[in-house]
Amino acid sequence: MALTLAFLRAAREDDWAGLLAAHPHQVTSMTTGLRSRLEELIGDRLESLRDLPSGKALADTIEAVDSTARQIGDATTFELILDEFVAAGGRLFTPKSVTTALARMLDVTPASTVYDPFCRTGELLIAARMVAQANSPHATLHLYGDTPDSESLSVARMNILLHDVEGELGWRDVIGLRDVRREAPRFSVILSNPPFNVANWDHGDQADWHYGRPPKHNANFAWLQYAVERLEPGGRAGIIMANNAASSANHTEKQIRMRMVEDGCVDALISLPPALFPGTGVPAMIWLLTPPNATRNEILFVDASGAGRMVSRTRRALDESAMTEIVQTVRDWSAGQPPTESRDLVNAIAVPLQKIRDLDYDLNPAAFLQRPYSPPGAADALPAVRDLAARLDAEHSIADQKHSDATDVVQRLSSPGQVSSPSPADWPEVRLTELCDLVAGTPTHDAPDGSVPVLKPRNLVLGGLAGPTDMLSADEANRLSRYQMRDGDLLCVRTGTVGRTGLATHEQDRWIFGTGLIRIRAKPDSPVDPRFLSLYFTHPIVVEWIRVHATRGTSIPNISSHVLGSLPVRLPPLSIQQAIGGVLGKLNDSITAHRRISETTAELRDTLLPLLMSGSLPAS
């Protein structure tokens, strides 16, 4: 929904002004009324405007989108919300550093016809146009894309329109049921980031494949062959692919890989670093392909697995120097220059076909390029080992005490006559909104050098808040002071895995919470204990209530702060709430203490392993 609202703000300024000025009770009907105009603009149905939250919740979202767009612009706001959208739905979004590098490798020019057979949100087509315009400001590219579902198609069309990109986007599964063959249009540039390792992709298509029918359990070589098939003479394709496609031992895949190599289709393979893609740390690889029957004696292998820099605690990006080095390596190779085996950030080598045959058509760059390994010295590593051992010893002591506390609690509860069970008949049932104020989170823009952490759904761990966070500058955090956290606040996931919660402590004071979350804060003098409330959200009855009330206007479940505020809360007296929190809190504390032991033990093992394996430290 927020994506569509960001697009509406950019595309229909007058209508947006009317929404901002409207009473909260009017905005739902007004937004629904605008649906047909937006659907006409993008040429597709907008399911996200069919099941809207009521009044106040929608008005709050409209206000948040407008405030963000005034600060950073419509296109950037759309991109920020898009990042949350793809993460919540388990989708894979191709980050800008990768799209730009790939478009540069393929030398997209104003004369290019560009096609993406799985165009996701249109990000690669946008990158192709940007690269062409950098060379020729008035370039008008012919851009085409396909996507397999209507929701992705709507988002892609909104995205390219926001970036002033004209393109023809369609909705069809181009590999599962291919209705185009050799008479279909050909393109000078094909670039794509299709889904990795898709099973059951073949929906009955009996057409022949040029290099062999891909196995039903994995579509990787369907995408690679399809790209080759759609290239015009002299064209080039760049396909982002799972690493296992380069070295899969599956007989069918190996045969297809061999035939593509022997027919000259495989020009180069580039290993990308891990953590480039939101939501996954898995590395990937770029295949550069050419049309069949090319004369080729060598294949270029580029290892860029160590390139780029961390822009947050979980995300890496290819900065300008990394992109330039990768792209220049590929361009030099295309121009007939031998690659430099060791640049500052990447290694590259041209491997003769005979050597590839000798390795049974293993196309993993690591098979030909291996960085020299320097074993760690004991003098440098032993202080870390001692620190970890001391920390582990302290954590064991803490865990022993937590375990003892938890055991005492359980024994008291299970002893006959030790448990008094006050009747809940007098416990009132109230709505959550009577006890707490609920505020939906705001889009944020990560600042790697920032000083204020930003909490997102991934930071809700075992009922608490933990893990690496994005960061904001202090000035930006002050501007977003409405979204600050304080001790006792509860965060609830509102999209995707709705209902998952995390309780803030004093450590999260003044941190900011982002989109995808709802902050639940007890009202002044409210008779509710925060720890009891966080545990209440894990009750099976409450979990089921949230599941039933989460809307599914799109494929991603979501719940608004308005709907969540109607959650019935059975509220015992405060003393009983605190007692319940104390009992279950002891068990949670024991779980947390043992989890820390596990993490520290794994860190100690990983620190010792290279020392022992290299002989720097005797094992006896």
Image (tube, rainbow, N blue to C red):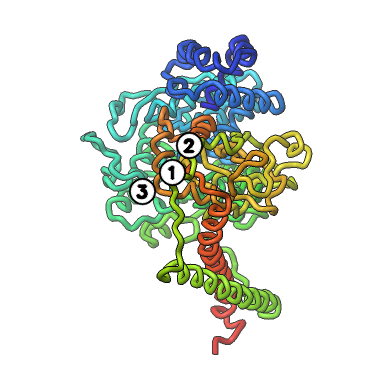
Which amino acid type corresponds to the residue marked 2 in the rendered image?
Answer: Leu
Instruction: Name the mark nearer the viewer: 3 or 1.
Output: 1
**Residue located beneath label 2 in the image:** 567
Left or right for 309, reference 105 = right
Q: Position of residue 253 (x, y in %)?
A: 31, 50
Image vertical order of residue 180 relative to residue 362, above or below:
above
Image position, residue 239 (x, y; %): 46, 40
Residue of label 3: 262
Q: Amino acid at mark 3?
A: Glu
- Tell me, for residue 542, which label it has, or none: 1
* First reached walking from the N terminus: tag 2 or tag 3: 3
Seen at 39% across and 50% down, the residue is 245
Amino acid tagged 1: Val
Q: Residue at x 41, y 53 (%)?
A: 244
Give the spatial CA distance, label 3 vs label 1. 60 Å
Mark 2 and mark 1 lie on one chain; the one further toward the N terminus is 1
CB under 8 Å between callouts 3 and 1?
no
